[in-house]
Amino acid sequence: EAGVAQSPRYKIIEKRQSVAFWCNPISGHATLYWYQQILGQGPKLLIQFQNNGVVDDSQLPKDRFSAERLKGVDSTLKIQPAKLEDSAVYLCASSSPPRTSIANEQFFGPGTRLTVL
Amino acid sequence: QKEVEQDPGPLSVPEGAIVSLNCTYSNSAFQYFMWYRQYSRKGPELLMYTYSSGNKEDGRFTAQVDKSSKYISLFIRDSQPSDSATYLCAMRTFGNEKLTFGTGTRLTIIP
């Protein structure tokens, strides 16, 4: 089974520029998550999708971050304009419907490492 | 106060030693407890999960939960150099898929 795919793997931009990240979840996984992991910290949930609907975006800085999941499969996360403090690894994860997994295991992609100069 | 506290380390131990990794939490609504392992430049991968107080064993790994003390631990027996990674505790409430992570403990096993 192919894992969660993310691109690009690395991105360097200057502050005030915009950037977009792409995620392709595991086939059949209805739930998709975007996390931000700042160096030395654990991942922090930014947004959770169930199919193409938003379940939780309470920690998404909506003045500069946006995300969409068209057709309930791939997802993009955008930052516009970027700030220095947005430097982090952006992780995408997906999970199968809760009824098929007690643990509701989230499978993570390799992440996109963003550096804002 | 953070909802989940984890000693960031780093922790270095010789090969074959027993490793103990710990997290405390303040939200008594947390019902599911997980340990993720994250290798450098990779995403986290689920190592173990538990949902009741007590011990759960899987090979060289034992997860321990004490809900009365709001304390969870991961023990690694006969540690190997391949265990060198960052270990993240994570937890969630019943009916909610959102995970709250600790800051992670960076572990190095010295051959």
Image: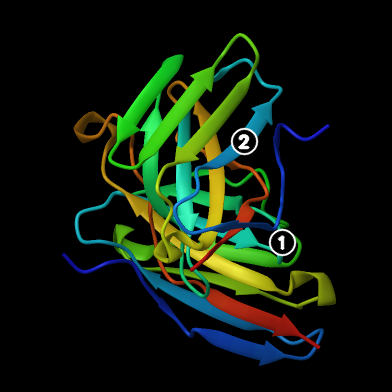
Mark 1 crowdedness (10 Å alpha carbons): few <14, some 14-19, many ≥20: few
| Residue positioned 71% across, 53% down in the render | B9
Query: Mark 2 against mark 1, which lies toward the viewer?
Result: 2
Q: Which of the numbered marks, if any, corresponds to residue B13? A: none
Q: Tell whether B21 sits left or right of A41.
A: left
Q: Quadrant of residue B52?
A: top left
From the top left corner, tell me how far across and down residue A89 is, in percent. 61, 70
Q: Nearer the viewer, residue A33 or B39?
A: B39
Q: Secondary structure at mark 2?
A: strand
Q: Residues within 10 Å of mark 2 (few under 14, many from 20)?
A: many
Looking at the image, residue A83 lies above or below residue B91: below
The outermost residue toward the left is A1
Question: Which residue shows up at 62% across the image and 35% down it?
Answer: B22
User: Image point 32% across, 30% down: which residue?
Assistant: B57
User: Mark 2 sits on what residue?
Assistant: B22
Q: Position of residue B50 (x, y in %)?
A: 39, 27
Looking at this view, is B10 or A75 the one in front?
B10
Q: Can I make out residue B31 in this image? A: no
Which residue is labeled 1 in the image? A40
